[in-house]
């Protein structure tokens, strides 16, 4: 199955799109072009289609694009970096709720330019271009895919408030302790979606945690082995991540974003990064599973009583 998927047109198209982003950053000498979540989005649309992503292709382009411009614009405010990130997180989540957006990568699109302190719109323009291509691919995939029937359940506001507070506290902890390795935007996108999903149990944690943690470890290893080569680091890390997803039999699109993170920020290229991914992902996934168990317990009791 792995070899067949590797040879498939959908995987190769997603792979080529990521390579184009890597090449563009070298040719234009603009590291700001790199948005790790583009890799996750491309794979999550073409290689491992996520049903609720491709159900509304327009959101794949419009939501992260507007979030990227918004996040960059916040850098012009006279606020501390932490206050900008908190403000960006809250406002983006509010707008996602108002416009009923279920696309988790919208959050890292807003937070990454603030975290990196970007003051030009290269990142936002790059996001606009590549997410437009991903949206176009999503329309093609949607026309061929058999999507679940019935209305899509939108998240509850209580769940959204709780997970936003949790993410905000984690970001605050990372800032106070200067542990930037705890800030993992692709993982934030995953957790935001998992926290609202209808079904997420403890048994789903180990495999996903393993994929993300091993991806981070191997990603940093490749980053040091192929130091100075953005293109080859990206090419190898994407391939490694794909193989890991196949071995653990869990497609985790955001893992592809994690694999590219060492390329854009020093802390994410350090050996502390895999530990940060392990801790951040492990804690947040356990919180998701525990909250799901607590929230669903009353419903289960009602069924038993009947």
Image (cartoon, grey):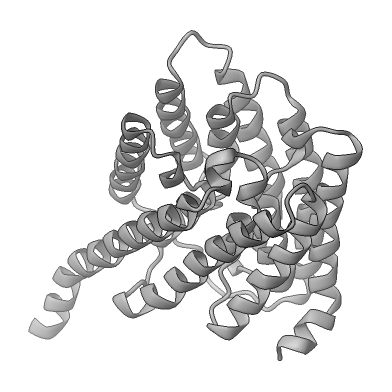
Percent position of residue 194, x then y? 41, 62
Image quadrant holding the N terminus, namely bottom right
- Outermost residue, top direction? 78
Residue 101 visible, this orientation:
no
How many labels, in total? 0
Instruction: From this view, report whether residue 135 is shown above or below residue 113.
Output: below
- Residue shown at the point (77%, 28%) measured from the top left: 122
Closer to the camera, 34 or 70? Answer: 34
Residue 266 visible, this orientation:
yes
- Residue shown at the point (79%, 72%) measured from the top left: 11
Instruction: From this view, report whether residue 217 is shown above or below residue 211.
Output: above
Instruction: From this view, report whether residue 39 is shown above or below residue 120.
Output: below
- Outermost residue, bottom direction? 1
The answer to whether residue 35 is left or right of residue 150 is right
Instruction: From this view, report whether residue 26 is shown above or below residue 288.
Output: above
Closer to the camera, 68 or 275? Answer: 275
The answer to whether residue 73 is left or right of residue 301 is right
Percent position of residue 288, x then y? 31, 61
Percent position of residue 17, x then y? 83, 57
- Outermost residue, left direction? 305
Percent position of residue 54, x then y? 67, 63
Give the quarter of the image for residue 306: bottom left
- Residue shown at the point (35%, 62%) measured from the top left: 282
- Residue shown at the point (55%, 42%) measured from the top left: 108
Closer to the camera, 37 or 92? Answer: 37
């Amino acid at each position: 199955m792995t070899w067949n998927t590797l040879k498939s047109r959908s995987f190769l198209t997603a792979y080529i799109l990521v390579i184009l982003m890597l090449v563009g950053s070298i040719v234009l000498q603009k590291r700001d072009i790199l948005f790790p979540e583009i890799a996750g989005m491309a794979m999550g649309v073409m290689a491992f289609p996520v049903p609720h992503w491709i159900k509304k292709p327009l959101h794949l382009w419009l939501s992260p694009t507007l979030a990227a411009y918004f996040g960059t614009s916040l850098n012009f405010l006279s606020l501390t970096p932490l206050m900008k990130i908190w403000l960006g997180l809250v406002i983006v989540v509010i707008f996602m709720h108002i416009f009923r957006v279920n696309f988790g990568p919208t959050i890292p699109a807003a937070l990454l330019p603030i975290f990196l302190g970007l003051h030009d719109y290269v990142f936002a323009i790059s996001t606009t271009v590549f997410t437009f291509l991903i949206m176009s691919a999503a329309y093609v995939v949607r026309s061929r895919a058999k999507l679940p029937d019935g209305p899509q359940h939108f998240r509850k506001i209580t769940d959204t408030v709780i997970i936003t507070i949790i993410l905000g506290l984690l970001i605050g902890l990372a800032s106070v302790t200067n542990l930037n390795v705890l800030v993992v935007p692709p993982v934030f996108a995953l957790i935001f979606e998992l926290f609202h999903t209808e079904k997420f149990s403890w048994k789903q944690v180990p495999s996903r945690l393993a994929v993300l943690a091993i991806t981070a470890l191997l990603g940093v290893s490749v980053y040091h082995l192929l130091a100075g080569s953005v293109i080859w680091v990206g090419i190898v890390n994407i391939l490694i991540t794909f193989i890991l997803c196949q071995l653990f039999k869990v497609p985790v699109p955001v893992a592809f974003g994690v694999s590219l993170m060492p390329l854009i920020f020093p802390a994410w290229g350090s050996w502390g990064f895999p530990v940060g991914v392990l801790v951040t992902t492990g804690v947040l996934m356990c919180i998701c599973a525990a909250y799901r168990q607590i929230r669903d317990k009353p419903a289960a009791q009602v069924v038993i009583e009947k």
